[in-house]
Image: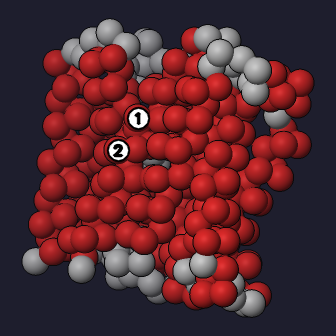
């Protein structure tokens, strides 16, 4: 059961990595990051709403706790997307990605404080391993090529904290309600928040643009499919494990860039990718056994 949960988290992370590549294509076409995020969540919401209505009687549950945790998860997803893009704008992708992927540290600390998990040298070692791999892969280890200002650092850490927030939100909501209900409530919350932040004129122009297909693909892969995998998988694994396994997203995004966008990886970046994959493999084997 644990292995099945880890596999679902891995599939979700792979989808997120692919969606990051699609988002990069749309940004290169001149679309604002917040608009891209809005459509990613809005298309996902339509998928979840259809799933929810398809079997309404079984999916509908009246529970204050379910609504609370689902809304919290939606706020976390919206905050994660928004802070991540703001961090990129204020610093660069390397800094933003590295700071956002400090999420396992936040998850581990919260899990210990809430007594959900026990502290161990193995868990902390896995966190350190993942962070080292991310630093190598993103190039954040080199101070000469990375410029960090207060806004970039604050928003990057905010993205990581929001990442942890939606992990715990989905984890607790999954125990109370079914995935269609949880996802519908969460992404409805997400859409309300992003509608306030996005440029409405640009958002409306997407409908008649030639890039509509990219936006639909982004929403289906980056939200519709991926979060279904994630919410089902998160029921079967600990929050800390889920946060570290999801780091495969960064590896997938890098490979997407190499295979489809013509990017190149240095030996140090390849080493970072290997460190991340090895750490996650060790973690997976440990959890299964």
Verify CB contact (< 8 Å) between mark 2 and mark 1. yes
| Kind of element beneath mark 2 | helix
The residue that appears at 27% across and 19% down in the rendered structure is 259
Of 1 and 142, the residue lying toward us = 1
The residue that appears at 58% across and 27% down in the rendered structure is 213
In the drawing, what numbered circle is on residue 18? Answer: 1
| Kind of element beneath mark 1 | helix
Q: Is residue 198 above or below residue 115?
A: above
Image coordinates for residue 131, horizontal then vertical, percent: 34, 44
Kindly indicate the quadrant of the structure image that contains residue 194.
Answer: top right
Kindly indicate the quadrant of the structure image that contains residue 118.
Answer: bottom left
Which residue carries the number 2 mark? 14
Q: Residue furthest front?
A: 54
Image coordinates for residue 269, horizontal then vertical, percent: 25, 24
Image coordinates for residue 42, horizontal then vertical, percent: 70, 46
Left or right placement of residue 62 versus residue 96 in this view: right
Residue 52 in view: yes
Cα distance between the residues tagged 2 and 1: 6 Å
Left or right placement of residue 29 versus residue 225 in this view: right
Of 71 and 125, the residue lying toward us = 71
Of 256 and 245, the residue lying toward us = 256
């Amino acid at each position: 059961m644990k292995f099945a949960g880890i596999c679902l988290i891995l599939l979700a992370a792979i989808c997120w990595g692919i969606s990051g590549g699609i988002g990069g294509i749309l940004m290169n076409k001149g679309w604002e990051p917040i608009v891209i995020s809005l459509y990613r969540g809005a298309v996902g919401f339509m998928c979840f709403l259809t799933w929810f209505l398809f079997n309404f009687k079984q999916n509908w549950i009246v529970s204050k706790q379910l609504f609370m945790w689902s809304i919290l998860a939606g706020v976390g997803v919206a905050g994660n997307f928004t802070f991540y893009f703001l961090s990129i704008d204020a610093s660069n992708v390397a800094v933003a990605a590295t700071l956002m992927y400090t999420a396992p540290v936040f998850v581990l600390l919260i899990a210990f404080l809430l007594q959900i998990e026990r502290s161990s040298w193995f868990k902390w070692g896995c966190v350190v391993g993942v962070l080292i791999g991310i630093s190598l892969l993103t190039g954040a280890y080199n101070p000469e090529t990375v410029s960090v200002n207060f806004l970039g650092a604050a928003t990057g850490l905010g993205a990581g904290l929001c990442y942890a927030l939606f992990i715990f939100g989905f984890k607790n909501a999954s125990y109370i309600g079914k995935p269609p209900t949880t996802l519908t409530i969460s992404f409805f919350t997400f859409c309300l928040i992003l509608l306030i932040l996005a440029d409405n004129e640009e958002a409306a122009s997407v409908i008649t643009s030639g890039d509509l297909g990219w936006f639909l693909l982004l929403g289906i892969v980056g939200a519709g499919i991926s979060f279904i995998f994630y919410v089902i998988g998160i029921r079967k694994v600990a929050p800390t494990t889920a946060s570290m396994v999801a780091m495969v997203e960064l590896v997938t995004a890098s490979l997407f860039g190499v295979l489809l966008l013509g990017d190149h990886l240095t030996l140090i970046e390849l080493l970072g990718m290997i460190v991340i994959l090895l750490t996650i493999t060790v973690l997976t084997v440990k959890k299964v056994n």
